[in-house]
Amino acid sequence: MQLRDELHQHNYRYYVENSPVISDQEFDFLMHELQDLEAKHPELFDANSPTQRVGSDLNNEFETVVHTRPMLSLGNTYNRQEVADFWKRVSDGLMGAPFQICCELKFDGLSISLHYEDGCLTRAVTRGDGTQGDDVTANVRTIRSIPLQLPKGGDWPGQFEIRGEILMPWASFERLNAEREQAGEPLFANPRNAASGTLKSKNSSTVAQRGLDAYLYYLLGDGIPGDGHYQNLEAAARWGFQVSKSMTLADTLDDVFAFIDYWDKERRNLPVATDGVVLKVNSLAQQKSLGMTAKSPRWAIAYKFQAEQAETTLRQVVFQVGRTGAVTPVANMDPVQLAGTQVRRATLHNADVMASLDLHYGDRVLVEKGGEIIPKIVGKAEADNSKLKNQNSKIEFVERCPVCGSTLVRYEGEAAHYCPNETGCPPLILGRIEHFISRKAMNINSLGPETVDDYYRMGLISNAADLYELKALSKSSSAENDFKSSPLGGGLAEAKILSSIEQSKQVPFERVLYAIGIRFVGEIAAKTLARYYGSMEKVAEASMESLMQINGIGEVIANSVVQYFANPDNRAFVERLRGYGLQMEIGEQQKQAQSDKLNGQSVVISGVFQHHSRDEYKALIEQNGGKNVGSISNKTCFILAGDNMGPAKLEKAQKLGIRIMSEDEFLSLIQM
Ligand code: IVH
């Protein structure tokens, strides 16, 4: 279909070449036209149509498929000597024949194998264990830089495989984490984890929104163009694949080192994360003659960049209070150049890390920029240990909140110290307001954190209930007919904010209960409490005994609820919310009882989850009559498995033939 071809082309121009020839609106227009056509003519359905990039809300069950050719990993080296050794091994292996090395960046994402037949993407499989991986085709189709259909008439072979790396660019990563922070969701540690979590998502429309990207670096198959790996990738670039422009051919070991040195610095200006370079013998015939070891090819090697370190002097430690109340020690140091930027501050994480470093003012310390974005102090500089012990006083963790002076607390099992003054300490107050307006709470989405900060600083709000008084402030100013002088900023933005505040009055009670921010009462616990008690009044009156009878509510949550409502300030806050018309009772359709769907079943939880925390899943299992147990036995009914389930557990489950259930399967089972 012509329209499809046209859209494929624009897509390539936009996402691979970065040089669109039509405007975004024109693109959207063409896309809508195609969507309409396809809706009218379902017989024209094509999984590779450009319209399929938006993903679907259907659950993707990942099928395990065996790789046509195993996906090997690479041997790693960390120093120049090992690179020189590699060069020598290759040269000896080729008995002195001349050879070239293709130097490439090592992209830090997750590897993918793409299969094309007659120019169409037919299958995308993750590396898995190298022999078999997950079929993630539906998710991969949403990645714009991966061609679904190669331009007609190209010299691509009828069947081939191309491998590469799926990545989340820094910009998408930062945006995603900012959104997650605002929604109170756990953050991804680095772009690789974010890309991997995203690609394994059961919902391809989530993948479509997250802005993944891909670089291809390995072409395989019988009919591929020629003997040169580099030249083959050049061909792939012509067919529409995104191939890194940094790739170069080296004739000498010095060329290789020049490549390494250049990119060790320059990689910081790239839009995606890289963690080294990959060196490959260019000739496929020479690759073949060098062969493989059991795990990796003899013709390629990865050189990993060092996490950059720098040495400097520690001057001071300040303690920052975050919006959850967590207190983080931050070191102020003499400025030092590190990974392309001047660094003068580094995190010390928490009291335990600080104690283990045994820091004194004036210590020479080593700072590192690793996979994380904020530099950290990793130890003392060698020279420091050989000198006489630093006579300056040891730096201790604070006992009181540096902002409001409250005595800090440390909750069992947590590494951080917290300021407990939730209603009186400014960063905590702001944190509570942000939680209140977040998407899963009251969803006052037109109000961003900066505006909250501004309103707080201007004295317009000092807690979330004050949001419902803002309307009055706006009215008084518009009565004077002077929009600009409105303390809320005026204009359309102000109107939007006021309207979403107004709309929040319809948010169901269970989310109001979540929004008021009772410590340890997450979404699920709020839901459980709302359904059990039916109204705010009843929750507020509940005793420890009553609360602890509820499946999924343990001592910690029960105690926190009782404490919350024992505080007259909190009660007054809730009463104000009631006065403004927020939902304080459960709606009819939410009254359904909890189920006994898992009656008596033992369930093991393993892995990392996307939608809810482990504790929340534990609560859900219990609310539905099941029991969460720690280890797998023949009594286990099923395993609720997230990403990265431990290999030992997986093996045991397979041996005992126990069902492994994904998050989404589980949620649809209990119909959350
Ligand atoms: S080539 C047999 N090239 O690094 C050759 N891999 O440790 C296989 N990677 O699993 C891979 N950038 O995920 C190759 N330019 C590049 C790469 C690259 C990143 C990853 C890939 C692979 C791992 C090997």
Image (cartoon, grey):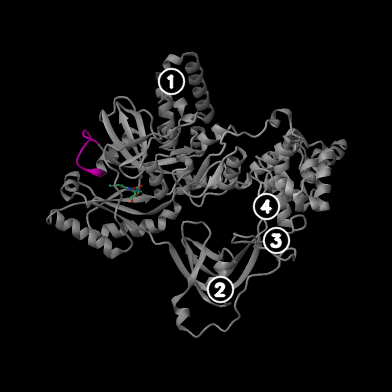
Q: Type of residue at label 1?
A: Leu
> Residue at 35% across / 34% down in the picture?
240
Q: CA distance from mark 3 to mark 4?
A: 21 Å
Badge 3 vs badge 1, beta-carbon distance below 8 Å? no
Taken as a whole, is the magenta stretch helix, strand or loop?
loop
Above-or-below relation of 88 to 448 = below
Q: Position of residue 165 (x, y in %)?
A: 38, 44
Q: CA distance from mark 2 to mark 1?
A: 62 Å
Whether residue 400 appears in magenta in the rendering, the answer is: no
Label 2 sits on a secondary structure element that is: strand
- Which one is earlier in the sequence, the residue at label 3 or at label 2? 2
Label disc, if present, on residue 419 of the rendered structure: 3
Q: Type of residue at label 2?
A: Leu
Q: CA distance from mark 1 to mark 4?
A: 61 Å
Q: Residues within 10 Å of mark 4 (few under 14, many from 20)?
A: some
> Residue at 74% across / 50% down in the picture?
544
- Which one is earlier in the sequence, the residue at label 3 or at label 1? 1
Q: Is residue 49 left or right of residue 603?
A: left
> In front: mark 4 or mark 2?
4
Q: Type of residue at label 4?
A: Glu
Residue that carries the numbered disc 4 in the rendered image: 555
Q: Residues within 10 Å of mark 1 (few under 14, many from 20)?
A: some
Above-or-below relation of 178 to 122 = below
Range covered by the magenta-colored residues = 221-229
Residue that carries the numbered disc 2 in the rendered image: 314
Badge 4 vs badge 2, beta-carbon distance below 8 Å? no
Q: Residues within 10 Å of mark 2 (few under 14, many from 20)?
A: many
Based on the displayed image, in which of its 4 quarters is residue 619 positioned? top right
Label 4 sits on a secondary structure element that is: helix
